[in-house]
Image (cartoon, coloured by chain):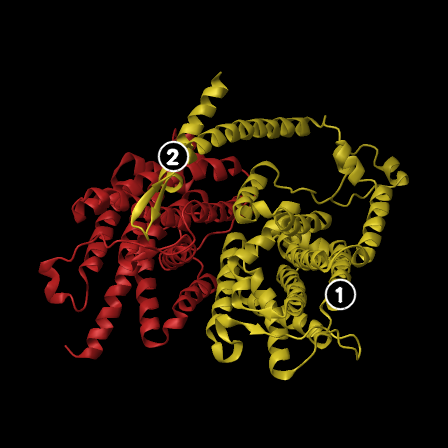
Chain colours: A yellow, B red
Amino acid sequence: MQILKKAILTGIWFAVLTFPIMVVKVDHIEGKMVWRWENAGYIAIGAALLSLVWRYLLERKAMRRRQEELAIREPSLWNKILRDPKLIRTGLLILLLLMLILPALSSTYHINIIATALIYVVLALGLNIAVGLSGQLVLGYAAFYAVGAYAYGLANHYLGIGFWAMLPVGGIIAALAGILLGLPVLRLRGDYLAIVTLGFGEITRLIIQNWSSLTRGPGGISGIAKPGFFNFSMADVAVSSVYIYYITLALAILTIFVVDRLKHSRVGRAWQALREDEIASEAMGVDTMRTKLSAFALSSMWAGFAGVLMATKTTFINPNSFTFMESALILSMVVLGGMGSIWGVVLGAVAIILLPEYLRAFSEYRMLIFGAIMVAMMVFRPQGLIPPQFRRYEIPDYLKKKSAGTPEGAKEGN
Amino acid sequence: MNSELQYFFELVFSGITKGSIYALIALGYTMVYGIIELINFAHGEIYMIGAFTGLIVAGLLGIFGFPLLGVLAIAVICAIIWCAAYGYTIEKVAYRPLRNAPRLSPLISAIGMSIFLQNYVQLAQTSDFLPFPQLIPDFEFLDSIAYIVSSTDVVIIVLSAVVMTALHCFIKYTNMGKAMRATAQNRKMAMLLGIDADSIISVTFVIGSALAAIGGVLIASRMGSIDAYIGFLAGMKAFTAAVLGGIGSIPGAMFGGLVLGCCENLAAGYISSDYADVFAFLILVLILTFRPSGIFGRAPVQKV
């Protein structure tokens, strides 16, 4: 009863709270007000129901934490499947085969959408290096994406340089931009770094927008060349979109592979140590400056690659594609999937691009839902859809005997 | 007065007007940061909601033919009430469950909240520009200086000065203000001394949102149009002002707002107006890079 009363009160509170915005609407052309009383009812009922779900989830989360502290919780079935390497390998192989024969099965329209999703996979994995692995919150990621896209766009427009030459160059230029920004600001931590990168992102966009003599301003650059295949040009739209699809697929697979190897490399472990505790990792001999800078540079390099790819795919770029909302979109992919988890981030990127594409009815509410998801994820499941897994090192048997007296907890290091 | 000098004073006065609005919004950032060390990204959105509430209330009253000053007063009061309620609710939904989470979690939650609110207003109202009625009348006794500073500017400057003085007195001399300062200094210690930290944090959000609401209605009346996206840029600039003055410091936020408004206007007037926003962001990046503690702030001592 108490719970129900609280839910009803929450409903009323939200109905009153959203009254001016939801119910009254200014029709400035006719100069009168439009009243939408039904909205107040929807809000009240929706908020009351949501508050019940909210309270239930909060309670469940608290209960789980208690169980985890007592270590009585069994890993769920879902987790067991995720931890079985054999199942994962078979699944991935099937997925790869499907992706390879996809152009034969579906239309150009679907190929284009999936190629876009793959570009975002590359972007999200790149941002994951900075945000997920090394814990540096970058809010201006779209700037590096813009650097890559404009590097190719301008080089193609003024100098006629082709896609294949610019793909590595675009990545390198974006990485240099990352280092250039990184050098002065990396001694800042957490939220200050986030704000500086946000400021940098906006400055980049505003400069692109206002430097009309070079970048053609808000109108953007159009007619960017599609990639060629040796000496054949890919003029036909259908053929060229299949070709671009394979290029993005190859780049996405390369990104997944490289980021996975990086994660378990020396520098990757240094990143994760830095994320967990900067002071402790410094005390253990991690060169924080160099480690952060490498994370920044690699992260922006992938944004550069994705930018070149995006420019060639759409053949048109303008500054409006690189706003803060774009950065937030990529960040929400990383957050939704699970910061630091490679497959989680891939899933997050694919879900965020494909769901609105196929659920057209919701596309208007896309950003609204993303915002809500970001809040809800942080409150209920900060580790993401597929949480990152720490590598476990087993102590071999002959060592166990020697250290028989050590406590149980020492067996499982991260 | 020659025209060169007049142009300069025009720029300075409109800079001070803009700056006092930045200061009003910056106070919300700085108070919240002072207490829970969170950059409240959704604060710019509160300012935007304040402007929208003001517009709606003014539109309703306009039908009944209220006198202009009455409309202004009621619009401001309604905006304050609703924005305060928004601030309270946002804190409770998006930040309170994350009180003990790692530092990046509430920040991401705040970004999500900001995106949510922006799209909520855009969907419920409109994504176009809405004309905002001029709520501040032209005063006759100000006619003699009207060529440098309009009466709208005078009202904004005076009103924000009054509000900021009141806030200063509230923080300095009331029990609640004392409790707020104590919580900002050391939350655990304050709780041990019997201060309910959660309610102090709520009060901080309520006051910050109310200030942003005043700023929203006033600046909308000066600019003459609003849309659902004004919150982001204004929020960023106000945050710049808060950082400039030293985040966590209340006089710093006021001073930072004025300096930022003047700098931006002078740079736009004498160098290039296309790059006015670039200057603001450049100041933000430079200050954070070279003097993160700002003008009035103390450099944080890092404890291991």
Residue at mark 1: A247
Look at 75% across and 32% down and name the residue there: A75
Q: Position of residue A174 (x, y in %)?
A: 62, 69
Mark 2 surroundings: few (<14), some (14-19) or many (≥20) residues within 10 A: few
Q: Position of residue A177 (x, y in %)?
A: 59, 70
Q: Residue furthest bottom?
A: A159
Q: Residue furthest top?
A: A1
Residue at mark 2: A37
Q: Chain of mark 1?
A: A
Instruction: Name the side, left or right, on which A298 lies relative to B221.
Output: right
Q: Residue furthest front?
A: A30
Q: Is residue A183 above or below residue A61?
A: below
Residue type at tag 1: Ile
Instruction: Name the side, left or right, on which A382 lies relative to B141.
Output: right
Q: Is residue A54 above or below residue B254?
A: above
Regarding residue B78, the answer to whether it shows in the image is: yes
> Are the residues flagged by discs 1 and 2 from a single subunit?
yes
- Labels 1 and 2 touching (C-beta < 8 A): no
Instruction: Name the side, left or right, on which B102 lies relative to A45.
Output: right
Look at 60% across and 77% down and name the residue there: A154
Spatial CA distance of label 1 from label 2 is: 52 Å
The foreground one among B297 and B81 is B81
The foreground one among A338 and B124 is B124
Regarding residue A285, the answer to whether it shows in the image is: no
Q: Residue furthest right?
A: A398
Q: Position of residue B258 (x, y in %)?
A: 30, 60
Which of the two discs, 1 and 2, labels the residue nearer the N terminus?
Answer: 2
- Secondary structure found at label 2: helix
- Secondary structure found at label 1: helix
Look at 17% across and 69% down and name the residue there: B147
Q: Position of residue A350 (x, y in %)?
A: 68, 51
